Image (cartoon, helix red, strand yellow):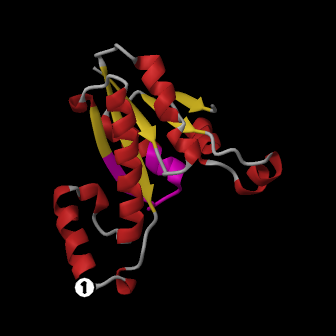
Amino acid sequence: MQQLLVALDGTPGSLKTIPYLARTLRGNDQIRLWLFHVLATASPNLLKKEEVQWIEQIQEDQPHLSGYFWTRQDEDKMNRAFQQATKLLLQNGFSEPRIKTWFGVESNETARVILEQAQALGCDTIVLGRRGLSRVKEFFLGSVSKSVLAQARGLTIWVVDE
């Protein structure tokens, strides 16, 4: 089964990938989609004790998150993006077992985290939305899709701009 990592950040640009994938891959039962999000790190000192304990429980099941913390607000945003994307895929004929969710924490450059997790999950394709930065902003700020393209080796990269 071919596996695609679909990078989502909750922005309209990243969610544009979902209708594109639904149209392009409709009827292909040999595809598994990993909806993936990178959470920003947060200091555990700024979190409530219950939040730290809750994250530590998650870390026991997902060792790649060990030592990193994030806010509940960011996780809620991520889950809304996952729910919205999953709903669109299900409405377009994807079966639930073919849709998985996964996340990482910004321990490194976001593009690097995406590439590392794609490899860890056995994905051979990464699908990204284009954020739509102006050329000037992209020159100064860079972009995740541009960094993924520059650093990817042995992977197919789809950048969706619809």
Q: In this view, does 48 lie above or below 40?
A: below
Question: Is label 1 in a helix, a strand or a loop?
Answer: helix
**Amino acid type for the residue under numbered disc 1:** Lys
In the image, 151: left or right of 82? right
Could you tell me residue 157's position as x and y percent?
A: 53, 29
Name the residue furthest right.
Answer: 136
| Frontmost residue, 67 versus 70 | 70
Q: Give the range drawn in magenta.
A: 102-114
Residue pointed to by mark 1: 49
| Frontmost residue, 45 versus 8 | 8
Q: In this view, does 59 lie above or below 112?
A: below
- The image quarter containing residue 107 is bottom left
Q: Does the magenta stretch include residue 110?
A: yes
Q: Is residue 94 magenta?
A: no
* Any part of residue 47 in sight: yes
| Frontmost residue, 48 versus 144 | 48
Quarter of the image with the C terminus is top right
Q: How crowded is mark 1: few (under 14 residues within 10 Å), some or many (20 or more)?
A: few
Measuring 23% from the left and 32% from the top, which residue is drawn there?
96
Measuring 40% from the left and 27% from the top, which residue is drawn there?
124
Could you tell me residue 26's position as x and y percent?
A: 39, 17
Measuring 57% from the left and 39% from the top, which residue is drawn there?
129
Quarter of the image with the N terminus is top left
Name the residue furthest front.
Answer: 91
Name the residue furthest top.
Answer: 27
- The image quarter containing residue 51 is bottom left
| Frontmost residue, 71 versus 18 | 18
